[in-house]
Amino acid sequence: MTRIDFSVGIGGAAGQGVATPGNILSKLFARRGLHINAYNAYQSIIRGGHTFLTIRTSQDPVRCMGDRLDMLIPLNQDAMDRHLGLMRKGSAVLYDGDRVKPNAPAEGVQLCPLPLAALTGNVLYYNTAAVAAVLRLVRVELQPFEEMLAQQFSRKGEKVVAENVAAARAGYDYAGSHFEPYPFSLPDTGKRLAVATGNESLAMGGVAAGVKFYCAYPMSPSTGVLMWMARHARQLGIMVRQVEDELGVINMAIGAAHTGCRAMCATSGGGFALMTEALGAAAMMEIPVVCIDVQRAGPATGVPTKTEQGDLWQVLGAGQGDYPRVIAAPTSIRDCFHLIPQIFDLADKFQCPGIVLADLLESEGFSSFEPQELDFNPPRDRGEVIGLDGAPAEGGAGVSPATGGGRRPEHPEGGAGVSPATGGGRRPEHPVTGYKRYRMTESGISPRAVPGTPGHAHVVATDEHDEDGVLISDEFTDPHKRQAMMERRGHKMEAVLPLLDPPRFTGPDAAEVTLLGWGSTEGVIDEAVEQLAAEGIVANHLQVRWLVPLQSEAIARMLSGARNLVIVENNYSGQFARYLRSETGIAADAHIRKYDGEPFLPHHLTDGVKNILAGRTTKYVPVHEVRV
Amino acid sequence: MGEMQIEPRTQPAAKPRRPSLTVKDFKGKADPDWCPGCGDFGVLNALKTAVAELGLLPHEVLTVSGIGCSSNLPGYINTYGMHTLHGRALAVATGAQLGNHQLKVVVTGGDGDGFGIGGNHFVHSMRRNVDLTYIVMDNQIYGLTTGQVSPTSRKGMKTKSTPFGSVENAVNPIPMAIACGATYVARGFSGQQKHLVGLIKGAIEHRGFAFVDVFSPCVTYNHENTHEFFKQRTRKLEEMGHDPADPRAAFDLGSQWGDSIPIGLFYRKDGVPALDELEPVLAEGALARQPLEVSRENARALVEELL
């Protein structure tokens, strides 16, 4: 079978219904077992402006939206004017011939004006007819679309279904008799793939982690997580709350987490800024909580609907003081799903906040998934926790809850096997089991007891405290205890690094150029490496996913043979380049950066590499060719 | 109080006899570091007395505070405790209450913590009618930062941050709480122990957001709203024939300030469902104790949606 690589762009004003044909086409492709990757360039406006959705499909996994459009569907004149100039030989432009007029297209671009008014008689069915015309041009049978329409409009009655189907057939037939189809037909691989946005993937990743408490304040481009969670809350038994502000969000999540729930929240950079003090609080009280920052173009309100990787240093520096935490950036929409359960395990095990640094490219884009990779019950590790059903911690920490032990007993390690009882008539003085919340341990991890557990009453405090949770910050500050506590919290994190998968390094060891990216740029760099290879330039690729702890040794090893290290990032100042240098001493030879609000396209990187290798620049900054 | 609902799953089916505890059993691991004569001692004592008299056990109560002199309270009481950030106690407590709604959640703090930096959470926790007790030790001053103006400082009051007298109006939390939807609104005075114990017991027993504003004089930084000041002016609502079911009367009495300042239960509305009662996801019991596994049917349905 020949490899199909087909991209459709749909453009129009917000409110004109760009999303609907986009979703339908994505679904129709995925139901043929074709992979997809889609990106929606949109604006902070409910009606008007310009929205442009790119959907790319192939039999192989699609890692980014690519460089080229095979089909343009401009829903208005503006979209036609903006994008027609980029259409190349062999492509087609499908539009409403009554309302939209093309300027001069490049040679070999097929213009496909549809007389939509005549074909459908009702503006409501224009998109239906247009989608059907697309299907005709890629030589796909109409029936699956008809079935989808019947399903989608069944609640609106038979008449609406019939009119939609009639519009689809009219569009399909008209395209068949008036336009030249593509020289291939979109195959059907015989399996079905799932399609999800990055926000949905983050939410479903939470479900797979066992999240029981989710809260958020709406903020683009993270709001999709809240909406997915809210829609599924009752089905899945998840408490979902919209909170008054992000200060409330993170603190509410911390409260729920302290009782033993897996608790998660998501926001964008501005909301994250409000949360930072509380992240330190979670670390100080040693409460596991996961917070997602879906980055958008900053600073301040910035460009709310545009993508950027500009929050790295905000997240690295979030909150006062030195405190334990883990930070990771998912490397694709699919990874949004897989990363969440992993970071929850680390947060639970090390009793610290876990921060996820996603971005709009991932959150608002959508991707195909093999259904079987959506494992909602991966292995889960809750760490050393006392009082949750069936989950006693090991060793002395696992002392069964008992409130009946009598006076201040110092049997710190013993007592295992004492049957749980709330009474016996004796007086439960407080530390009956000798339980100390912040006990000094070899690993630095002190087993945590959840409130409600008899015999383990204790205070968790954001003030510095001793092993027993008693404050040492006010009346009797104690330098020795303070130092010991700082060291215990720091020491426990040393065990994180060995648990992480190494960063992904692909390509030959000996390469002319090494491209290093972090987070969401994995797919586009992969594709750029292939394009470079086709032009005879050998490149390899290191993609960083775990930011704290940074796998410095592994990274240094992988970069030891790099002849030309080029760091690729979607920000202005080279935030990761600075971070890498500060942690490893490794300075990049050159940089490719983009901060116009739009993601990299593969050719931005290949152009950059060629310019860098030719010695023309050490910092290549492409800009999006189209104003979207 | 009747039967407590709080039982860990590991507890044997047969109900053991509940121990009866005294105030002493609720003594915390540390001794208060408040200034001698601070009103907060009275509030701490009243709270310990209330939980003891209600027959609660230490592990059944979660005491949550923010930051400030009075917010040190969780360290001085033998219950589960969270000493959180300045202004954030109500948000944390809401999360904890929803995480395990079988806990009795008590939030303690000061006027700056609750009405200043935490004002937004105060408003929204009340409109949500979260099932918790919120005790504010209101001393009309910022004590731990050594004497600056607070949201409840009188207009004209001279403090270290208003050396020429405050030009801002004070907030009156009682009418505010009634307007925002709190379903139990009371004011006490730390110098009236027995009365205060009664108000706190009523608050803990109340299902919904119970707010108890307590005059708790700062002996070091507020020389205006002293123990003597409140002793002379406070009048008990219970002796005034006030009906706490009447929100308008409660609003009027709560707004009264001057030579006669009412204390007692201003407003109480029973039968308003608390936030946790309105969420079907809590029907299976405490959220924190639910298994993390996703059922086979749900996992299948989630994938099916995406196909």
Image: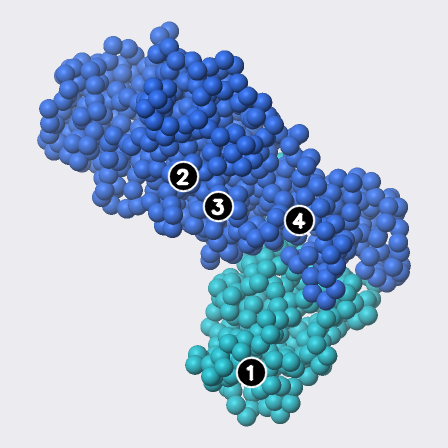
Chain colours: A blue, B cyan
Query: Which residue carries the number 3 mark?
Result: A314
Are callouts 3 and 4 both on one chain? yes
- Cα distance between the residues tagged 3 and 1: 54 Å
State the mark number for residue A18.
none
Tag in front: 3 or 4: 3
The residue beneath circle 1 is B243
Q: What's the residue at 88%, 54% (across, down)?
A: A410
| Subunit under mark 3 | A
Residue A111, position as x, y percentages in the image: 15, 21
Q: Which residue is mark 2?
A: A573
**C-alpha gap between disc 3 and disc 4:** 21 Å
Give the residue type that dot 2 points to.
Ser
**Of residues A584 and A416, which is closer to you in this image?**
A584
What crowding class fits label 1: few (fewer than 14 Cα within 10 Å), some (14-19), or many (20 or more)?
A: some
Q: Secondary structure at mark 4?
A: loop
Left or right relative to A154: residue A319:
right
Q: Earlier in the sequence, mark 2 or mark 3?
A: 3
Marks 2 & 1, CB-CB < 8 Å contact = no
Q: Secondary structure at mark 3?
A: helix
Q: Residue at x 70, y 77 (%)?
A: B35
- For disc 4, the marked residue is A286
Dots 3 and 4: beta carbons under 8 Å?
no
What is the C-alpha distance between the residues marked 1 and 4?
A: 46 Å
On the same chain, marks 3 and 1? The answer is no
Q: Secondary structure at mark 1?
A: loop
Q: Classify 10 Å Cα crowding around label 2: few (below 14), some (14-19), many (20 and above).
A: some
Q: Is residue A368 above or below residue A138?
A: below
